[in-house]
Image (tube, helix red, strand yellow):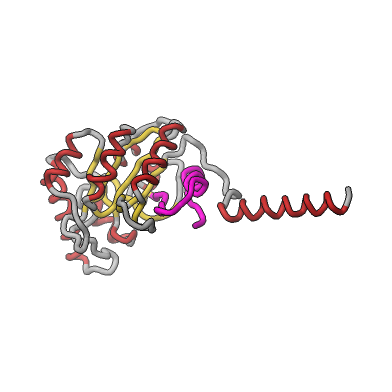
Amino acid sequence: MTLGVALVTLVGALVVLTIANRYQLWRLPKPNSWPRLLMYHSIANEAATGMNTPPERFDAQLAWLKKQGYVFCTVSELLTTSKPKAIAITFDDGFANNYHQAFPLLKKYQAKATIYLAPEIAAIDKLMTAQISEMQASGLIEFGAHSMTHLNLLQAPTDIAQAEIVSSKQQVEALTGVACLTFAYPFGRFGAETIELVKAAGFSSAVTTKKKIIAHLTAQTFTIPRISTHGAMDNIQFYVAVTRGRYKF
């Protein structure tokens, strides 16, 4: 091997290693039989951030998932399905743009999703009752609870945490007219007591912000991990996230 060929080979190897490290391609992909949950918040024509995904980016991600044969489920459906490539799209907080921007795209791809409402969350433009009713009636959207005010339940006194959890379930059921079965811990914060309060309130599942894909959701029904997203993630990062459970940004 000549010096020139050796240098080219070395440079090529370094490039491959750099790309592999950049995108965490060294992580082993999880089997298609393992269910996935994707976590979003806002879908708006605003700057791409960890909380906001521009509509065109969300559109491209849904299109890719559809093309790859992923089966869209609500979180409650995901707990009972045995279909391969089952995936649940979730939105936290209840932004109004979930109706204006995300819902038309979900209908376009006939993609089901679960939206976790915090009915009295401050400082965001929230979903209106009529919008919630329309989304519920479509058969594509499941509504879960996310506490009343998006309170850090782990830091709250027990009675306050209990009231936030119970009241949010009651309020979501009043808004939708159907049972509210799933809960999302605000800020992803929870402890053993929080879990027991959620169970006692009558929920059948709860999701976290833990970045992971697991084989059996029923093994940890009240601490279900999700795959986080970022509005500026590129196609490779999204692929790595969906197949591996987390990505490097």
- Quick check: can you spot residue 142? yes
In the picture, residue 37 is in which quadrant?
Answer: top left
The residue at the point 27 percent across, 39 percent down is 104
227 or 20: which is nearer to us? Answer: 20
In the picture, residue 80 is in which quadrant?
Answer: top left
| Looking at the image, residue 33 lies above or below residue 45 | above
The residue at the point 44 percent across, 34 percent down is 85
- Quick check: can you spot residue 191? no
Name the spot of residue 49 as percent of width and height, x first: 38, 58
229 within the magenta span: yes
34 or 73: which is nearer to us? Answer: 73
In the picture, residue 138 is in which quadrant?
Answer: top left
Name the spot of residue 109 as percent of width and height, x first: 33, 33
| Looking at the image, residue 186 lies above or below residue 176 | below
The span picked out in magenta is 225-249
The residue at the point 46 percent across, 33 percent down is 68
